[in-house]
Amino acid sequence: MDETEFWEIIDSTREAADGDPEDHADLLVERLARLDPDSVLDFSRHFEARYNRAYHWDLWGAAAVLLGGAGDDAFDYFRCWLIGQGREVFEGAVQDPDSLAELLDDFDEEIDGDGEELGYAADEAYEQLTGAVSPDLGLPPAPAQPAGTPFAVEDEDALAERLPALWERFGADEDGHRSGRE
């Protein structure tokens, strides 16, 4: 499976789910279960590589702005959700997390930002196809620490400084403070 096919599967299942992350995950499992096991593992490798690429301090800050705070698990699920938004949004966010202010049409923290189930879709499809747990993908281990310069993602001033457009659109109230989404 090449990168184009990977993104086509992500996009077509997201569009069919009308952006609902849970429906997206269900449709992704169904779509992947129609492939052969090796193709599902290829998909999984593409997903995991992008998931690891998104392990960056500034993206963690973006998750904190959008979600009103983001611990370890929330950031993990956010990275899955980000992949689920498609190539343009994902690549734009990885290159410049502050660009999410323009790349996202809207963000509803009740349904957006948590793609936990997307992260398990390939494993579920592989198990449906083979009755076995997915083998090791042969990828380098996930980084121990996020890339980039560390900062306190719970610090509103640091978030506003690092991600000014995102903070202005999704994080701040009229006074420049968190909009009360905690």
Image (cartoon, rainbow, N blue to C red):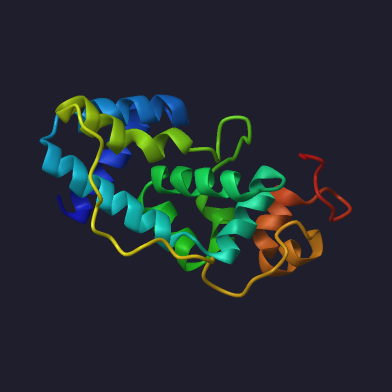
The part of the image, by quadrant, that contains residue 126 is top left
| Left-right relation of 100 to 158 | left
Q: Is residue 70 above or below residue 91?
A: above
| Left-right relation of 149 to 139 | right
Instruction: State the residue at coordinates (70%, 64%).
Output: 164
Q: From the image, which quarter does the C terminus lie in?
A: top right
The location of residue 67, given as percent across then percent down, is: 66, 43
Instruction: State the residue at coordinates (15%, 29%).
Output: 130
Q: Is residue 153 above or below residue 67?
A: below
| Left-right relation of 75 to 90 | right
The part of the image, by quadrant, that contains residue 29 is top left
Instruction: State the residue at coordinates (65%, 56%).
Output: 166
Frontmost residue, 53 versus 84: 53
Q: Is residue 11 above or below residue 127?
A: below
Frontmost residue, 152 versus 161: 152
The location of residue 57, given as percent across then percent down, is: 59, 65
Frontmost residue, 47 versus 2: 47
| Left-right relation of 83 to 138 | right
Q: What is the residue that sits farthest to the right in this orientation?
A: 175
Q: Examine the rendering and report whether any part of residue 28 can be seen.
A: yes
Q: Examine the rendering and report whether any part of residue 17 can be seen.
A: no
The location of residue 44, given as percent across then percent down, is: 27, 46
The part of the image, by quadrant, that contains residue 40 is top left
Instruction: State the residue at coordinates (80%, 44%).
Output: 179
- Number of labelled discs? 0
